[in-house]
Image (cartoon, coloured by chain):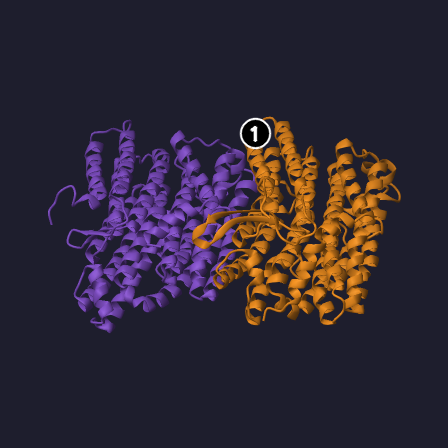
Chain colours: A purple, B orange
Amino acid sequence: MEYNLTTLQPVLPEIFLLSAACLILVVDLFLTEKTRLLTYGLSLAALIGTIAMTQYAAGPAHEIILSGSFVRDPMADVLKTGLLLVTLFAFVYAKDYLRELGILRGEYYVLGLFAVLGMMVMISANSFLTVYLGLELLALCMYALVAFHRDSKTGAEAAMKYFVLGALASGMLLYGISMVYGATGHLVLSEVAAVIAAGNADQTVLAFGLVFIVIGVGFKFGAVPFHMWVPDVYHGAPTAVTLFLGSAPKIAAFALAIRLLVDGLGGLFEQWQDMLIILAVLSLAIGNIIAIAQTNLKRMLAYSTISHVGFIFLGLIAGTDKGYSAAMFYAIVYALTAAGGFGVVTMLSRNGLDAENIHDLKGLNDRSPWLAFMMMLILFSMAGVPPTVGFFAKLFVLDAVVSIDMVWLAAVAVFFSIIGAFYYLRAVKAMYFDKPIDERPLLSSMDTQVAMSINGLAILAFGLFPAALLTACRTAFGI
Amino acid sequence: MTADWPIISATIWLPILGGALVLASGDKAPNVSRWLALIFAVLTFLVSIPLYTGFDAGTAQMQFVEKAPWIPAFDVYYYLGVDGISMPLILLTTFISILVIIAGWEVIQYKPSQYMAAFLMMEGVMVGVFAALDAMLFYVFWEAMLIPMFIIIGVWGGANRVYATIKFFLYTFLGSVFMLVALIYMYFQSGSMEILAFHDLKLNLTEQILIFIAFLLAFAVKVPMWPVHTWLPDAHVEAPTGGSVILAAIMLKIGGYGFLRFSLPITPDASNELDWMIISMSLIAVVYIGFVALVQQDMKKLIAYSSIAHMGFVTLGFFIAFIIMARGDVDSGAVLGMQGGMVQMVSHGFISAAMFLCVGVLYDRMHSREINDYGGVVNVMPWFAAFMVFFAMANAGLPGTSGFVGEFMVILASFRADFWFAFLAATTLIVGAAYTLWMVKRVVYGEIGSEKVAALEDINKREALVLTSLAVAVLILGIWPAPLIEVMDVSIENLVRHIAITKL
């Protein structure tokens, strides 16, 4: 194909982000500790610029370029915008925390931007190779970010676990991809789907390949039984990294699932639906039950992540466009909520002491009523209590599940979410009903406070008016 | 008929926005937040009065209807309206809220702005529950009630408040989520989210029984019915006075309202099949819980158990309709039973609110709810004693007070159904008098219990205002219940006619 501005317009956001990240990498070399904020500002500008580019290139058409390896469709537009906004919040929250720990290095932002680039490539993937490329770019940046705090033993341990397990899972994914390639003879997802639809592929090899691909997807999400890395990595990584790790990659994992399982292997729906049902129920059960036992806030949120992944899978299980759009709504809403939740934890951390236990939340209503209110909105959104947006996320997924006559699955999901409500209530209880252990006032910079307010109020606003975001998710799937 | 002015929306959103404003006013000048809250509560009550004055008692149609699309993708509308069943309950809510704000004036010293804001927001949400005609809108309001109540009990409650509030939240949440699944299922069966469309939706018996059980879980916990009543004594006892008043006066009625709006009209055949279960649970509540109340040492716990017993009358009144209709009797017996249940709901709202406020008056002074710590209060607080005895008589069901009207109607209707139902229900007249009057005797009369009791001061003007308003309401409703009964008559007759027709 010809490479000029018009033909490359769909991939303009990625090009912009790559250039910006490289520029920031070089600029940061010449900055000192005092002028580090320039890196921070440039990164935010890069993200905002990429959002602008994404919106500029957006449209209703499905554009496939670069020999079928890259696709720009409405789903990609919505997911990329959501991803970039969540990353924006993550970067803002991370700054003060990193500075307190003395690790405010430009590498955090550069690695973060490259990770975002990897996620954008995953979202726009139309070929197995592109998927893997984006996935590995994301993964390698995340491995480095988890180990970012060099003096932390738990950080090093977490990074080691993440790296080894992640490499194993990537290997499984690649193995599955190679089998599907062997069975269908194509790497481009649309062509793979065509071969499967025509019935020309070896069913046994396809089935094996599907299993390994589901394993890869499950690991990326953190679904049971591939969830082992989640609590340790969330706990061990510096909270600024957990914040980024727990929010944005969920959107990318959702895109991974859609591209691989729906766009590529949609013809094998019955097989992977059964697998996902098992993964979903186990994730809901184990995530919610084990979270009750946690006293560390980061671990509790990690296990709650596993339970939310179960809900996202329920949307995928539905197999209808309504179901996929519900799962997308849930993924975006969850990323926003998780960013806020971990953001509060970063705001509480001071003087190098991580405020990562539930008892660090005690008496937050006395120390900072507004922050306590924001955290309450976030926690109730995760529990799925109206009028926060988390309720509607669960509602739409349950709608999709009931529409395919799997009422039992909906009943199981709500049952486990009742169990889940307990640990969120415990955190709210600590904030409002207990006296503070640490009486020091909370100091955070203006941009962090503004970002947290927008984050919390968005959760309430979307809860009162969910139609806007829902329509965006539905048009992404053409309904 | 559609409303010219969005009165219902105003009644819902005015207190919510008022609550936000009160929250923003902060705690630097607490009197500002208190007066602001009072102004908003009074305004809301005034805004809700046209719902009564402009109400057409001759039709069972929904009135003051407002409908606007909310989530078009799922056919969810912002759909509000009232009929003879919901309108009295909305007025009860707005009236009681004023009293709650006044009652918490001096005793709440820790973050009063948050306290007042929580009550105002809860008021708006509770009105929304009564007025919602769209299933999802109803559910959002239903669940949204839990958050302010959770905070109120947990922050300003008694010693064991954390246990009580988490129990309250989880119990109620458990019941509600299964109702959600039932509502979603019916959406897919009917293609619409309107509750009135669910009333007409044809369902087979298995579906009806499952949906009935799902609704039962939600409403039985809310009412509360034996055996899922155990959250109530804890929640009522540990909540601050205002919280107990709202819980007893309004929240319990939301469960009863749920039976009338959902269980009976949507699943009439299942209600018919399982009426024996509800009636036995109600009678157990009336008799057994009455005896449990008799042995309580904590005044608030006693009144809490008495609430459960009184709500047993409500559910009894609702479900004996099926027994009566099956006997081929004149169906005015069925209507009488339901009307009795409704009147009992409104009357219990006033009486239990008053009893909790009386206990609150004593607790503010002595910081004890134990009956043993009191005695001979009449000697030092004669005006208070007058009020307390009056409300105790109303609680026991003395004719002339509103407590009698509802109970009498339900017992009369029970006679039409079965002699033994009426016999068991009528035991409340004895047991209710026993526990209430025995408590009054030990607290108010007799010798002065201790020096602390001797030093008690009588009620001040603020407390007198609150108690007088309630006394007037109880008396008027007791002597002249006609305005209430006329308003709900047509709606209840319509409901009885509807449940007489099988859906199968």
Q: Secondary structure at mark 1?
A: helix
**Residue B211 percent location from the top left of the image:** 56, 64
Q: Nearer the viewer, residue B333 or B312?
A: B333
**Residue A417 percent location from the top left of the image:** 49, 56
**What residue do we see at 47% from left, 58% from top?**
A289
**Residue B226 percent location from the top left of the image:** 68, 61
**Residue B425 percent location from the top left of the image:** 78, 62
Vertical relation: A57 (above or below) B138:
above
Q: Nearer the viewer, residue B19 or A243?
A: B19
Chain for disc number 1 = B
**In the picture, which quadrant includes the C terminus of chain A?**
bottom left
**What residue do we see at 54% from left, 53% from top?**
B134
From the image, tell me which residue sits under label 1.
B25
The answer to whether A50 appears left or right of B152 in the picture is: left
Vertical relation: A432 (above or below) B398:
above
**What residue do we see at 27% from left, 42% from top?**
A54
The number of discs equals: 1
Seen from this angle, which residue lies furthest left?
A2
**Is there any visible trace of residue B295 in the rendered image?**
no
**Is there any visible trace of residue B206 in the rendered image?**
yes
Q: Nearer the viewer, residue A114 or B326?
A: B326
The answer to whether B479 appears left or right of A314 in the picture is: right
**What residue do we see at 66% from left, 66% from top?**
B500
| Badge 1 amino acid | Ser
10 Å crowding of disc 1: few (<14), some (14-19), many (20+) = some
Q: Quadrant of residue A432?
A: top right
